[in-house]
Amino acid sequence: MASALADPNIQKFLKWTAILTAVMVVGFSTYYYISGGTEESGELHYRTGNLRLEDGNFQAALTEFSLQLEEDLANP
């Protein structure tokens, strides 16, 4: 009695399923990292506010810091 895994079509299907699954996991992980899914709440406004301070645009920096505080009061 032959095993189902001995069928070349099944082997081909399993190989491509494994490859596509790996590509999807790597792709999703990369997208999640790039899109800022790992950042804490309000961190984008904090970084933008610091950039505005370095540029000398104090009003825009104050606006960004205010938005950061509105988003996350526990992380001033």
Image (cartoon, helix red, strand yellow):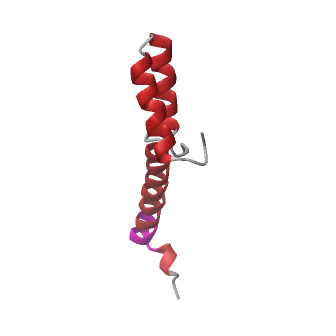
Q: Nearer the viewer, residue 52 or 18?
A: 52
Instruction: Note whether 24 is above or below 2 in the view shown.
Output: above
- So how many labels did they put on this image? 0
Q: Residue at x 51, y 83 (%)?
A: 2
- Which residue shows up at 43% across the image and 31% down it? 64
Task: Name the residue at 43% across, 54% down.
Answer: 24
Horizontal side, residue 24 vs residue 73: left or right:
left
Picture residue at 44% right of the left edge, 74% below the top: 7
Placement of the C terminus among the 4 image quadrants: top right
Q: Residue furthest bottom?
A: 1
For the residue pair 37 and 65, the one nearer the viewer reads as 65
Where is residue 62 shown, x and y percent of the image?
Answer: 45, 26
Q: Position of residue 6 (x, y in %)?
A: 50, 74
Q: Which residues are magenta?
A: 7-12
In the rendered view, tell whether residue 72 sits above or below residue 64: below
List x then y, in percent, for residue 19: 46, 55
Residue 9 located within the stretch drawn in magenta: yes
Compared with 72, 63 (above or below) is above
| Magenta span main SS | helix
User: Foreground residue, 54 or 25?
Assistant: 54
Q: Is residue 66 magenta?
A: no
Residue 43, given in percent of the width and then of the height, sits at: 52, 37
